[in-house]
Amino acid sequence: MDTLGNYSDKAIELVMAYAPKLLLAIITLFIGLWIINVVTNITRKTLEKSKTDATLIPFITSILSWALKLLLFISVASMIGIATTSFIAVLGAAGLAIGLALQGSLANFAGGFLIIIFRPYNVGDLVEAQGHLGVVKEVQIFNTILLTPDNKRIIIPNGTMSNGSITNYSAEGRLRVDMVSVLHMRLIFQRLKRFCQAC
């Protein structure tokens, strides 16, 4: 009976010690999730009003939502009393491993953001890049899609698009075309005719 009494006393002490922290952590968790939903909805509406590419809107909002939720869970765990330093170290190591595994995809992702920020071309521009000529159909997160004059769909990774040379034929609005005059063409044909007759 004494041991049961001791265990019950210790249990009551633990509940009295941790109950306020646990209650505060639960309240913080629910309020934090509600604030994160509000922030992501505001971000989504702002991106839609600014006419951001429709492909990027769910991607950006999901990244923002997951990042804020991760910070919220770490802060709630520290409020309860869980040591978060080792947890953050594990997350950092996992992030490094994922980054190394997805190095090419991350390069394309970063290239997509550089293209969106610096705008070397827009949707609808006639461009020549990586040996392909076509109209920019869509700028996605990882790829740029070109539509060639013969109606072929070319998909080029954004990493190579952001690092390579791009010729944008639509940027200046007008193109200069050098044409040989008709008289000059006649002289060339006459010389060719004489050369053929001489042979």
Image (tube, rainbow, N blue to C red):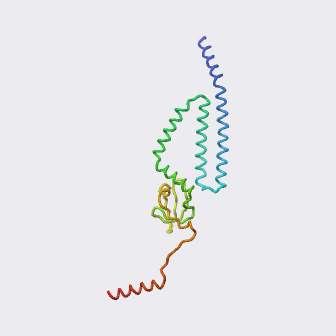
User: Quick one: 58 or 113, which is closer to the camera?
Assistant: 113
Is 1 above or below relative to 125? above
User: Quick one: 26 or 191, which is closer to the camera?
Assistant: 191
Specify whether 106 is left or right of 37: left
Q: Quadrant of the N terminus?
A: top right
Q: From the top left corner, tell me how far across and down residue 197 is, in percent.
A: 34, 88
Q: From the top left corner, tell me how far across and down residue 154 is, in percent.
A: 49, 61
Q: From the top left corner, tell me how far across and down residue 17 is, in percent.
A: 64, 23
Is 78 above or below relative to 130? above
Outermost residue toward the left in this view: 199
Q: From the top left corner, tell me how far across and down residue 104 is, in percent.
A: 46, 50
Is 44 above or below relative to 74? below
Is 73 above or below relative to 194? above
For image coordinates 52% across by 32% down, the residue present is 86
Q: Quadrant of the C terminus?
A: bottom left
Quarter of the image where one finds residue 188: bottom left
